[in-house]
Image (spheres, helix red, strand yellow):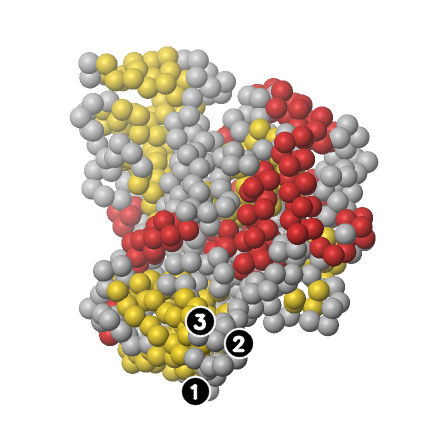
Amino acid sequence: MNDELPWDLEFHAVSVAGGLRVTAAYDAVTLRLGIALRNDGAEVALPGEVRLRSELEAPTAGGWAWLHGRFMQMDALVHNFGADVPEGYRGSYLQAREEGHRLISKEQLVVTLPVQGNPSLVVGSLRMDRFFLDIALETDADESHIEAIELVFDLSGAHIEPGETLDLPPVMLADGREALALIERYAGTVAEEMGARVPDTVPVGWCSWYFYYNRVSEADVLANLEAMRAFGHPAGVVQIDDGYQSSTGDWLRPNERFPSGMAALASRIAEAGYRPGLWLAPFVLHEDSATLRERPQMALRDTAGEHVFVDTWLGRCAVLDCTHPDSQEWLHDVFATVVGEWGYTYLKLDALAYAAQSAGRVRYHEPGTTAAANLRRGLQVIREAAGNEAFLLGCTCHFGPAIGIVDAMRVGPDVKATWADGNEPSVRHAMRMTLQRNWMHNRWWANDPDCLIVRDTDTDLDEAEVRFLATGIALSGGMVVASDDLAKLGQQRREMALALFPPSGVAAGPVEPGDGPVPFAWRTTLADGRAVLGFLNWSDTPRWVTRDQYMEPGEIAFDLWNARLLGMGDVLLRPHEGALFQVSGRGPTPRCVGDSASLGYHGLFQRQVSGQLELRNDLDRARVVAIESRGQAFAVTLAPGEHRWFQ
């Protein structure tokens, strides 16, 4: 090592193929651990896996580990040392070993140990386009001590010629006092390293999936389009999800429920003033699809030469070899048609993770291809064909290989119109995974927390749970995409949804990051001294919000869902309820400090003139606004078009 590592760590290789020599050097200025493999043997080396280990005898009292999975369905949570796997998580991050436990995080890890001078440590891969990295903490049986940290690189598919050197992805190691600040710094470094794409504004839209699922029809889309036009819905995108295609893989052959064809439907959407969006799962081909039958050479084969099939929610599918020239030609033709000829410039790309098949299981057309590299190559072909202006949303996708290619990423599992169902789609599971990845938002891409469902029919969600989902989506700062039959929404639920259009665009941070497995209280700092404060009652019993614990002296809070100023007392949340407060400090002149119609004051004209405040409601619905003036706060209702002055 060139420089001393944080926490006095000293990594050494403990698992490496014969003939390979590992060198490692840490730069304390760039905070990077550089690792290289040199083949000193006479034969081609297949490293397979490389493991580096540092002993660390450190008490864990009061500490926690912030663990991450590498795609949206994998666990992301705060693990308080000594705690069991919480209900509903998959739990693969916690493994038993002889006389202890092994906690595993994918690509990045934050661990906080109060005993350390700088209590928080971030460890993370800075390039994830070719190799995956597991970061493991080894503890004793009761997790009272951490005994070691290991870096485990999956190099399956790589080969090193005699005399050649393979540079592994650099690993950031940095310590500090604030866990959240460390992982945000890490995310920014990765973004610079991999050329992340971050859109100027966070998209909003409507999606067909969570009401119609794969039974969607052209008539359903047009009915919702008409409802959107009727009341001027502020969604920018109308996205058709799974269900238009004749078969998974036959993307250019719509089924009988879309008689006009996809180009004609895109034109209708654009004529209505919205951006046409379309769902595809480009890296899987259903076993009965015409595409697989006509182009079998595109599908991955195993080491015995047989096609590889995976069982998915889309059925039994073959997987695309994205390194094969025929696959690349086919992908290019599909996306050039969908974007350039049909007119869909917003694309939701799903089931992408299946492209990341281990090179120990399959044979890629291009030698040396790894699981991550096959996924990234496919995404690169799509970007090249779709063009730089197309908006690409990744879904069910390994995070790292997509950085620099996609504009947005689903960061949590599917929602559903039900509160909880273990680790299956539900409001609880989607939000607890999504919020733990807020640090990715506006650094690697725009986060997609999945869809907003507010309906009060065809649902298992009660009002408190709908508020929970809306609060979680707001706190993500990410995309807001409605997914109800809009014509059937009652006024109250429709207005609840519209309050999130447009989103703040800023991800909230946990007030107490070590509040595991997912925090209760979140805060977003906005411009002009404003903030958003949110609370999520994950439990099956009521819970109090203690006002003075979360608000600064002199701050004023407006309860968005109840359209009222917050008093001095505490607030009781029902089981599974979310609360969202607009928060402001006191100001020298009259100003608006709360708005029931919009988290971001959309459609509210505001102007300060000579110590007076001019407000005008430009929406077609009434709104309650809170005004702070001369140290006093009060709420008033503005009718549609109403204009008022405040001294």
**Residue 549 placement (x, y as % from top left):** 27, 50
In the image: residue 365, left or right of residue 429: right
Q: Is mark 1 in CB contact (under 8 Å) with mark 2?
A: no
Specify the farthest residue to the bottom.
99
Q: Is residue 215 left or right of residue 373?
A: right
Give the CA separation, mark 3 to mark 2.
9 Å
Image quadrant containing the C terminus: top left
Residue for badge 1: 99
x and y, in percent, of residue 632 in the image:
23, 27
Q: Residue at x 40, y 43 (%)?
A: 442
SS at circle 3: loop
Rendered position, 541 above or below 230: below
Vertical position of residue 371 compared to residue 635: above or below: below
Q: Is residue 420 visible?
A: no
Mark toward the start of the polypeptide (1 vs 3): 1
- At x 66%, y 55%, the residue is 324
> For this view, does 366 lie left or right of residue 512?
right
- Quarter of the N terminus within the rendering: bottom left
**Mark 2 neighbour density, 10 Å: few (under 14) some (14–19) many (20 or more):** some
Badge 3 local density, few (<14 within 10 Å), some, or many (20+)? some
* Kind of residue at badge 1: Glu
What residue does disc 3 label?
164
Query: Of 346 and 52, which appears nearest the observer?
Result: 52
Which mark's residue is nearer the viewer, 1 or 2?
Answer: 2
Taking the spot 53% from the left edge, 76% from the top edge, the residue there is: 44
- Label 2: state its secondary structure: loop
Please count the marks in the image: 3
Residue matched to label 2: 44
Q: Is residue 217 above or below residue 403?
A: above
The reply to whether residue 508 is in sight is yes
